[in-house]
Image (spheres, grey):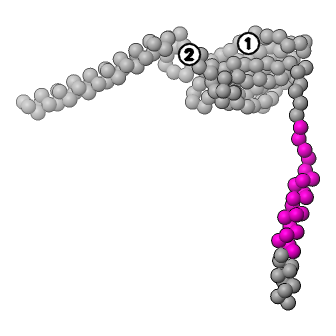
């Protein structure tokens, strides 16, 4: 009786994985191809200092549905994102780095399917108190000035409290 149980357990232990391997081997395959005939629109996303917005979340909205995205993904290491529109009209695209920087743009796709550069209108989310027109150097100077002024205030208050104790 013990031998039959051991034989049964070993049979199941060896046959069970074979069955699952056959099932996984019977799954559908995959393939790919390069399709050079499709019109592709590529956006370059970057910060005001021309640094690329690397690996940012991107949402693309078709003219047929303004609420549910047609496509989503991430920019590459150069801040680029491409998509292939399937209908003419005004397409909306949004890129966000998840840290408060967001760019929204629109591109008008014509019914003609030949590749051409389309004019892009964009709207930027103001991500701070400073205007985009202020140079990076001025921002650094203002930041250093703020730090020095805070240090001077603390030094003044400390000296004042020492002088009161001395009196």
The C terminus is located in which quarter?
top left
Q: Earlier in the sequence, mark 1 or mark 2?
A: 2
- Circle 1 SS class: strand
The x and y percentages for residue 14 are: 85, 69
Q: Is residue 103 left or right of residue 112?
A: left
Viewer-side residue, 107 vs 20: 20
Q: Is residue 35 above or below residue 141?
A: below
Look at the numbered discs 1 and 2 and tell me whether their residues touch, using CB distance below 8 Å: no
Which residue sits at x=66%, y=20%?
45
- Circle 2 SS class: loop
Quarter residue 21 falls in? bottom right
Q: Is residue 32 above or below residue 83?
A: below
Q: Is residue 95 left or right of residue 115?
A: left
| Residue 102 makes an appearance in the image | no
Quarter residue 64 falls in? top right
Q: Is residue 27 left or right of residue 44?
A: right
Which residue sits at x=52%, y=13%?
131
Residue carrying label 1: 120
- Magenta span main SS: helix
Question: Which label sits on residue 5?
Answer: none
Viewer-side residue, 96 vs 76: 76
Residue carrying label 2: 49
Q: Which residues are magenta?
A: 11-31
Distance Cα–Cα, label 1 vs label 2: 20 Å
Q: Residues within 10 Å of mark 2 (few under 14, many from 20)?
A: few
The x and y percentages for residue 140 are: 43, 17
Which residue sits at x=40%, y=15%?
141
The N terminus is located in which quarter?
bottom right
Residue furthest left as drawn: 167
The x and y percentages for residue 85 are: 84, 22
């Amino acid at each position: 009786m013990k031998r039959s149980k051991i034989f049964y357990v070993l049979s199941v232990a060896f046959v069970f994985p074979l069955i699952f391997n056959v099932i996984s081997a019977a799954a559908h395959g995959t393939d790919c191809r390069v399709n050079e005939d499709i019109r592709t629109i590529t956006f370059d996303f970057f910060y005001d200092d021309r640094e690329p917005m690397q690996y940012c979340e991107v949402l693309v909205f078709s003219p047929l549905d303004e609420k549910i995205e047609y496509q989503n993904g991430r920019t590459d290491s150069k801040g680029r994102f491409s998509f292939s529109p399937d209908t003419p009209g005004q397409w909306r695209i949004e890129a966000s780095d998840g840290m408060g920087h967001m760019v929204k743009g629109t591109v008008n796709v014509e019914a003609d399917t030949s590749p051409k550069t389309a004019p892009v209108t964009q709207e930027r989310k103001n991500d701070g108190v400073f205007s985009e027109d202020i140079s990076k150097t001025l921002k650094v100077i203002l930041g250093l000035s703020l730090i020095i002024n805070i240090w001077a205030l603390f030094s003044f208050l400390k000296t004042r409290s020492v002088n009161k104790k001395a009196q």
